Image (cartoon, rainbow, N blue to C red):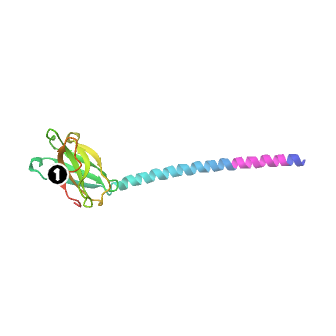
Amino acid sequence: MTKQVFFTRALYTAIVCLMLVSVAQTYRMQTLKLALLAENADLNRLKASNAMIDLRLTSLDAKDPAYQSGKIIVAWDPFQYRGVISIQNLPAPTAGCNYQLWVLDPGALAPISAGLIHPEAGSSFFASPPTSTTSPGFAITLEPVEGSSEPTGSILFAVAPGQ
């Protein structure tokens, strides 16, 4: 066997070995990628189940006798600063007005608007800027139809922070 044939065979053998290593590395990378995706899916399921642990449910008390038949429940996520308000038996707002939800944060200078709520919807999502407590209070007032930057109407429903 000549030197040239020997080197050619050695070169082909080296190329085949490199190709096999490359295929093995690609297979290993794909396997690791699939394992990582599975781990991420497990992590997301765990996060979703743990999110319910800290969910705060609270009922707002009617502060005005005319609204005693209304039932208001807030489900609040204190780590994402958002929630859902569930409304039952709340009469339609008077003409030119809307109900507005407020977050009562003891660390804030004033109530924080969480937006207008519509009793006919039954429930709605809301969000708030970060609060100084994981257990803020909530209040509902009757405000001008476009809402207000601070409460102007009397408090119809409320629950104090920490309750």
Residue 77 coordinates in the image, percent (x, y): 31, 54
The residue lying furthest to the right in this view is 2
Q: Is residue 9 magenta?
A: yes
Residue 137, by quadrant, is bottom left
Is the magenta region chiefly helix, strand or loop?
Answer: helix
Q: Which residue ends up furthest to the left in the rendered image?
A: 65
Instruction: Give the number of callouts.
Output: 1
**Observer-nearest residue: 103 or 162?**
103
Looking at the picture, tell me which residue is in the foreground, 86 or 10.
86
Quarter assignment of residue 46: bottom left
Whether the magenta-drawn stretch holds residue 147 is answered as no
Which residue is nearer to you in this view: 70 or 53? 70
Quick one: SS at disc 1? strand
- Where residue 1 appears, as percent x and y from the top left, is 90, 47
Q: Give left or right: position of 94 versus 34.
A: left
Residue at position x 53%, y 51% from top? Answer: 35
Q: Is residue 90 left or right of residue 108?
A: left
Q: Residue 157: x, y in percent? A: 16, 51
Instruction: Tell me the residue that label 1 is attached to.
Output: 157
Magenta residues, start to end: 7-20
Q: What residue is rendered at 88% in x and 46% in y?
A: 4
The x and y percentages for residue 49 are 37, 53
Dot 1 alpha-carbon crowd within 10 angstroms: few under 14, some 14 to 19, many 20 or more = many
Q: Is residue 128 left or right of residue 72?
A: right
**Quarter occupied by the C terminus:** bottom left
- Amino acid tagged 1: Phe
